[in-house]
Every structure is written in structure tokens, then in C-alpha cells.
Amino acid sequence: MQKIIEASDISKRFGETQALKDISFSVNESEIFGFIGPDGAGKTTLFRIITTLLLPDDGEMKVLGMDSKTEFKELRKNIGYMPGRFSLYQDLSVEENLNFYATVFGTTVKENYDLISDIYSHIEPFKKRLAGNLSGGMKQKLALSCALIHKPKLLVLDEPTTGVDAVSRSEFWEMLKKLKQYKITIIVSTPYMDEAMRCDRVALIQNGKILSIDNPEKIKQGYSRKLFSAKAPEKYKLIDALRKYPETITAYPFGDSVHVTFTGDKYDSSIYTYLGKLGINDAVISVTEAGIEDRFLELMNKAE
Amino acid sequence: MKRFLGFVKKEFLHIFRDFRTLIILFGIPTAQILIFGFVVSTDIKDAKVAFLDLSKDEVTQKISDKICSSGFFRRAGDLENYDEIDLVMKKGKAKAVVVFGANFGVDLISQNKATMSIIADGSEPNTATLITNYLTAIVTDFNREFAGSSLSDNLLVQPEVRMFYNPEMKGHFMFVPGVITLILTLICALMTSITITKEKEFGTMEVLLVSPLKPLQIILGKVTPYFLLSFINVIFILLLSFFVFDLPVKGSLVLLLAESMLYILMSLSFGILISAISKTIQQAIFISFLGLMLPTILLSGFIFPLENMPEAYDWVSAFLPPRYFIVIIKNIMIKGTGFLYVWKETLILMIMTTLFIGLSVRNFKLRLQ
């Protein structure tokens, strides 16, 4: 299979800050490849290097078989890029934005309408509205339509779901999945760990380094400890108490429960007495299966 | 080409959607022309003139009567000596004083020549210029009549005009050239630099860079609408000054428009240069104002005459394009001179334009920093 992106030992520094350090990875055709990591991990910098907007200090970046440094002109024609802040003209209407990007990329809306119809149909009723007056979810859909309008081979989405409501986020991932049938490779970054499961493969990135690359299921299975879930009506009091408990290794909030690990992967009834002393009498602790977030947190703690 | 036109269309949409941009484009020129125009009133009526007649003969009597019966002037009183001139002017009792020397009439008849002085209050320079012009015209008229009656060709009263308080009188009768320069500088440099940095600030530049658009297409696409609008603006200002204030273009209109195009191009390339080096809109505005607007207003001879400045400022202003453009349009519009008189300034502007275009294309980043 052809590699869409091949990155080897990419490094980039801005003054004192090492934004990326020896990053290597490859992306396959028609893959949804996710970069998960906290703010400031280096995701945007990496995406800008992929889209030829920045040059790496070190290392080689091959995108669609082309060198991002020397063949950037040809490469730019085949990339659809959606920057972190939706790059829309706020004072142009939905329709005008789309038409503009179509013309700039040398195509028309009509020509590639099938490709975007699924997405664009959601916002088409508002096509006369100025982009600045759209909701976050609609802006996101418009920006995606604009990035797709020239039928790029590679779609680069920098935090497309940030600042968008949960329903729109979910819809958005469904749309990305549908794009696979057009053989469009997608790389996407997100700070939301739960979105990792939606990708074919994910790379966990922190402080400019890739901690792990694999498909989400495998990453999840890499969890090394036995995980317990603790529940109590007063969740924050519970976390606090668990973190102070001497046998506790980690305790993180997870939904309405707390995910805890203990030394020796077990606990005994003395914990209930301990919690009881702190006024938490109705805590329930049970074994649970680790999710991808748990694995990420584990990897991130290890790296620090 | 289609890409380029699409880009230009988008820029026009930006301009016409933004109320503030429209105001800057068309409101400010109108306001400036009207304000400057009405401050520089071209009419005088019943202007107060005092007379210091040291001769007190028939001829001086005739001249002063002629002045006061013209409808433009009103006799503000007769003075006894030179010291009173300053006094009546300071008190604002007279805008001008006409002085006839001793033996005025005798000199005129015996030597065919006599000298009178017109002293005007230069603290209101525009009025002062008008008053002296009118007074001189009346005296010339008198000459003709007097010469006709005595059948002699050389009988002449020579008015000698002096300005009090502002002897230079320069830089005030040229508000239209000044406004054109200011507006062009403002629209071209400031607006272009803002519109390009705006793309940077809103992140749309990232996508434009990733698009197949060439840098030159982006720059030209940004600049074309402003070029057209600025040109329309020049015509608009000229029409306005012609119809509202009767200020015609004395020289060649084609030359004037061609020179304006050159200056527009210069300002636009300067604007692009500003946008290439600034990252935010604020920075662009700051550089435009400090680097261009203030020097234009202060040092280009628009408001303050260059001749009155210390030499150092003169040197600084030698690097400012508006200075040359003001000279060019002043020559063409007001003096009515041709290209031969402005070729040096034109050449300097051309060199500057080439320099700015070169620098801005060089500085336009194909990538982010």
C-alpha cells in the first residue's frame, strides 16, 4: 500500500521551545489517522509542517510521495487543510465562502458537489447567512466543505471539534468516516481522548514527542495494571480521599466515577474504613476495563 | 486568471460589506475636501481695510474710494502713523492696511511711478492672500484708468504686498493636492496593509498559502480593488473640488491622473511591505500611522512649509514619497506646468515604487514563521 505521509525524525524548535523532537510516523492510504495530545503538545506545528506551511529544522517529510520542502507547490494542490481556527471569511456568506475556495482551487462547487453534499446539505438552508453568524457546529461543517471542495487526496484537520457541541462532534466523525469511500486520507488532531476510538490509528503526542502509535484497540489493551472503578455521590471528595490513600498509585475522574489503581493491583476492605473516616460511607469499588484514556494517562505519566 | 478574478471579487465583497471601510474610502475624502474647502473660503465680502495715507492727495483719495466702493472692502478707519498698523491688526479692526507713501500723487505725476504698500494679516493666510489679490487687482484697474486718462503708457502705481505674521504664505493654497496625497496614502498603504494582515490574524492566510494561488496572485488580488477605488477617489476629489470650489486642473488632466496612478502604486507596494513585516492588524496600523501618515501630514509640506523647517527635517522628508507627489500635483494642478517640470519627482517616485515592490515580494512569506 502506498504511504501517504512518511515522516522521519522531524524536529522543530521555536527559540527556546522544542516544539517537536525526532518525530517519525507514516500514514496509509484512506486511513483516518489521529493525533491525540494536550494543548501545546506540538500538534499544530506538526500539521503545519505536513501542509508545507513550516519547514522542519531536521528530518524529512514526504507527503503524497513528494518532499514537503522542495515540491511544496505541487503538493499544495492536493491538500485540503482546515486550520485550528476555522479559516472562514466572517463577512462573506456561506455560499460565498464555498464559491471562493472552489475558485481559488480551480474548481466549481457543482463539480465536486457529491463529495460535500452530505456535509453541505446541513448548512445549505443557511447559505445566505454570513459565516460570522453561524454556530460553532455549522462553521465547522462549512470549513470542512471548503477544505474538501477541490477533492484533495489528503485532508488535514487541526482540532476540528474544538469548541463544537457534543452532537455536532459526533456527526462530524460520521462524516469523516463516509469520506473514506472517496479514498481521501485524513489526518486529524484533537485534545479529546474519547475521539481517539474513532480513528483507524492514533498517535499520542506530548511535549513534541510521540509516545505511542497504534490502532486504538491495541493501545487500549496495552494498559499494564488492573483498573478499578470507585463510585460515591460526592465524587470530588472521593478523588481527594483516594489520592491521599497510601496504597493508591493513580486516581482520575472518569465520567461519574473515579478510575483508581493500587499497588499490587488489589485493595482490601481497609480502604472502606479509611474512606469512612473521611466521611465517605457509601463508596462502591469494582474492577473495570481500561479505556483508551486510561492508557493515554498512563503513557503520559510514564513520559514525565 | 479565473482564480485571480475570484480573489478580486472576494476583496470587493469585503470592502462593500464593511461599513467602516466604505467610510474611510469615500466619507473621509468628502469630509476633508469640504472642511478644507470651506475653511479656505474663496469669497471675501466687506473685508475691513484701514488706510494710512501719508500723502493725502487727490490720487490716494481716488484709489481708496475705488477700493471701498468695490463691495469687497469696508473702510475700517484712517491711521495716523506706522505704529497704529500693528495695533489695529492685533485688535482685529482691520484685515489689511493700505499705505500710501508721502508725496504719492506728486511722484506719480512727476516720475510716472509711485509706491504703495498693502499689509495684510497673515495669521489668516487664506483670507490674507485673497485680500491682497483683490486689492492688487483694484490697483491694477486704477492704473489702467489713470493711464488712459493721461495718455501715458508708463504711469504706474506699484503695489508692494507684504504679509505680517506669516510671510511665506506657502502650503495653504493647496488643500486639494494635500488631501489627494493624504487620502491616497491612507487608503493604499493603510487599507492594504490591514486587509493582508487581517488574513493572517484570522488564519485564512494559512489556507490561501496552502492553495495553488501564487503569492503574486494573492498580492495583486488584494491590491487591484484598492487600486481601482483609489483611482475613482482621485477623480471624485477632483470633481468635488471643481464643482464645489471652482478649482480646475490647470495642467494636463491625463498627466495628473497618470502621476496619481504611479503614486497609488507606490503606496500600495508600501502597504504590502508593511503587511509583510507585521503580524497583527494593530501592528500594521501602528506602522502605517507612525511610518507614513504622520510624516505625510507633518513633513511633506502639506501643512507646514518645508522651507521653514530645520535642515535635518528637510533631509528626513527627502525619503518620504508624499513630498514628491505633492510637488507634482501642485505643479500640474495649480501652476499648470507640464511633465518637463516634474520629471525629477516622477523619476524618484518610480525608483521608490520599484524598490517597495521588490522588497515586498521578497518579504512575502511562502510559509508561516
Image (cartoon, coloured by chain):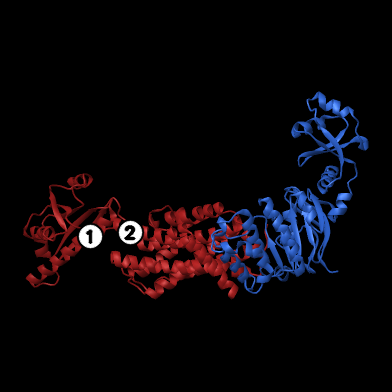
Chain colours: A blue, B red
Query: Does B120 sit above or below residue A182?
Result: above
In the image: residue B223, left or right of residue B52: right
Task: Mark yes or no: residue B328 visible.
Answer: no
Q: Secondary structure at mark 1?
A: loop
Mark 2 vs 1: CB contact within 8 A: no
Q: Which chain hosts label 2?
A: B
The residue at the point 58 percent across, 56 percent down is A134
Q: Residues within 10 Å of mark 1 (few under 14, many from 20)?
A: few
Q: Quadrant of residue B284?
A: bottom right
**What label does residue B34 carry, if any?**
2
Q: Please provide percent x and percent y for residue B356.
A: 55, 65
**What label does residue B43 carry, if any?**
1
Three-letter code for the amino acid on which mark 1 is drawn: Asp
Q: Please provide percent x and percent y for residue B343.
A: 44, 72
Q: Please provide percent x and percent y for residue B35.
A: 33, 56
Which sits in the foreground, A4 or A162?
A162
The residue at the point 41 percent across, 72 percent down is B257
